Each structure stands twice: as structure tokens, then as C-alpha cells.
Amino acid sequence: MGRVFVAGSINMDVVATAERHPRVGETVAGQAVLYFPGGKGANQAVASAKLSIPTTLIGRLGTDAFGRELRAFLAAQGVDLAFVKDTDGAHSGTAIITLAHADNTIVVVPGANGLVDADDVAAPTLAKGDVAVSQFEIPLPTIAAFFRRARAAGVTTILNPAPAKQADKALLDLVDILILNETELGLLAGTELSDHDTASRFAEAARTMGQGKIVCVTLGKRGVLVLVEGHQPLLVPGREVKAVDTTGAGDCFVGALASQLAIGRPLGDALAYANAAASICVQRMGAAPSMPTADEVNAVLSTSRPGAGRDP
């Protein structure tokens, strides 16, 4: 069985709930302030670890109260923290989130995450059969160094280019599986996309991401559009659930997919599994704390099995 290595961010999410999001220059009355461990790297690592897959997180924390709390939480979820450094003089990453009727807006302050470097990602030993995962909340040169090491070791690389920002072709060429939403795809493809666009339009944009990689476009309730070179686009249907908080859904999908690929499951089965995991995640508050266990995902799959996918 392979392992999952996640190089990425670790944040404390400070969540303010309200009836609606404020407009620019407006103040609205909130309902509650909540604190949840988060950060895309930590979320994805927790999603994998809670599915009983050996998972190592590579990243940095500040030596502040948030850092101590985050380290304790991650350890309790079974994440290997041997390569998470405490960094003097930097605060732990913090995300300020406004949540209204399950929709969120997020401002991320990187803190120690912005200091994760090539030496950090060079420390773990990678081996064939492992899966290397990263996102855009740590410096892009660090991600490139991580993926170059992974490729040299015969490791599958997964990139979640979020939050959306431009990336050069050299980095994208190191990616085996690209997982992104319509906003991120639109930015990288240089086109305007919305969640109401047709699947064929998403597929057209996804084809510009370069040859030799699998592209998964997450479309919320509509499911996941998957492009594999040499095959017709496949739409894996979403699951109808009552969403409470969508903050960690994409990260849950990424971590769950990585976990299943690490144990050798075929891509189609891994996608269905990740879809089920994400459908559980959105029914709970918080990012990392909302990640499901393997028993919970298997229960969903056993009671409701949508088709493996269909042509869009």
C-alpha cells in the first residue's frame, strides 16, 4: 500500500456566521464566531488520514497559540507531523471566513505557510506507489520542487490549484492529476467560466491544460467532469444532500481521491468514493473537523450507488 504526502498550508479558520454576506463597505450583524482547524494542506491530509491511509503532512506552523492547537488537532486525526516545522517569528496561517446559508467568502493570511521551502519538501523519502499532493497556499517554487522529487521517485502527483492564481507551464507539466473548480480552470485556461456553463464548455477549457494529465473539474451538486487523454469526457454525478458548510468540500474530495489511489483503486472507483466523502463533509460545520471516516463513506456507498458516470 502506498502513502499520501501532502505539502501544503495549515490554518486556523475563524468563521463568522451571518444571515447574508455584507456588500462592499457594509457591516452586517453576525450570529456566532467559531474556530476550526483548516488550511487546504491540513484539510486534505486529514481527509486522507481519517480514511485509514498513512498520511504525512509537510508544512509550517507559527509558535503561537493557534500553532499549538493545530498541531494537537492534526496529531489526534492520525496525520504524521514529522515534517511540520515550528517557525519562530511567524504567526500560524489564518483564514477569515464569512458563512451565510452554506456559502462562504474567505480571506487567507499565509503566515508561516508562506515560508515552506524546497528544503522542507526534500526531507521526506518518497517511493513508487505513493501519492504527492499540493495546493496553491504555499509558494509555487516549493510545489515545483516537491513534484520534481515525486516524479523522479515514480510517485503520482496531484495538484489542486487553489486559491486561483496563474501558474507556468513548467509546473503544470509536473502534474499527473489536476483537480480544480470552474474559477480555477477559467483562470488557468484564460477564459471566463461560470458554474452554469455546459459540461462541453468545461471540457473544452480543460483540454488546454496540457497533454498527459487527468483533469477533474469539480462542479458542486452537478458532480465532477473528468477528462482522460484518449477518452471521452466523463461526468461523475453529484449527490443530493442538504449542505450546511461547503468550506472543506473540495479538500475532502482531493484527500479522499489521493487516499484511494494510494491503495491502488481504479480511477473510476476512487472518484465515486471521493464524491461520497465530499457529500458527507458538506453536511457538517468546519473544514478539517468535517472529514468523514472510511466507515461513514462506505455506509453512503452501500445505501446509494449512482451510476459510475455518463458522457456529458
Image: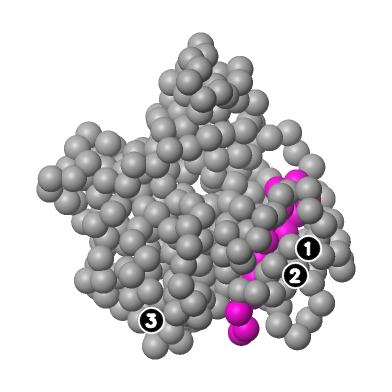
Could you tell me how far apart the alpha carbons at marks 3 and 1 are, in whole angstroms?
Answer: 31 Å
Quick check: is 28 in the magenta stretch? no
Q: Nearer the viewer, residue 68 or 187?
A: 187
Q: Earlier in the sequence, mark 3 or mark 1?
A: 3
Label 3: element kind: helix
Amino acid type, mark 3: Arg
In the rendering, which numbered label is found on residue 151?
none
Q: Is residue 69 left or right of residue 286?
A: left
Residue 101: percent from left, percent from top: 65, 26
Q: Position of residue 304 (x, y in %)?
A: 82, 50
| Amino acid type, residue under disc 1 in the picture | Arg
The residue to which callout 3 is attached is 148
The quarter holding residue 217 reads bottom right
- Mark 3 vs 2, N-terminal side: 3
Between 48 and 194, the residue placed more toward the observer is 194
Label 1 Cα crowd, 10 Å radius (few <14 / some 14-19 / many 20+)? few
The answer, for residue 29, to whether it is visible in the render is yes
Q: Is residue 272 visible?
A: no
Outermost residue to the top: 29
Q: CA distance from mark 3 to mark 2?
A: 28 Å
Which disc number belongs to residue 204?
A: 2
Front-most of residues 189 and 159 = 189
| Pointers 3 and 2 in contact (C-beta within 8 Å) | no
Amino acid type of the residue that numbered disc 2 sits on in the rendered structure: Glu
Q: Are marks 2 and 1 in contact (CB under 8 Å)?
A: yes
Residue at (43%, 58%) from the top-left corner? 136
Where's residue 305, x and y in %? 82, 56
The spot of residue 296 in percent (x, y) is 64, 47
Which residues lie in the magenta part?
210-224
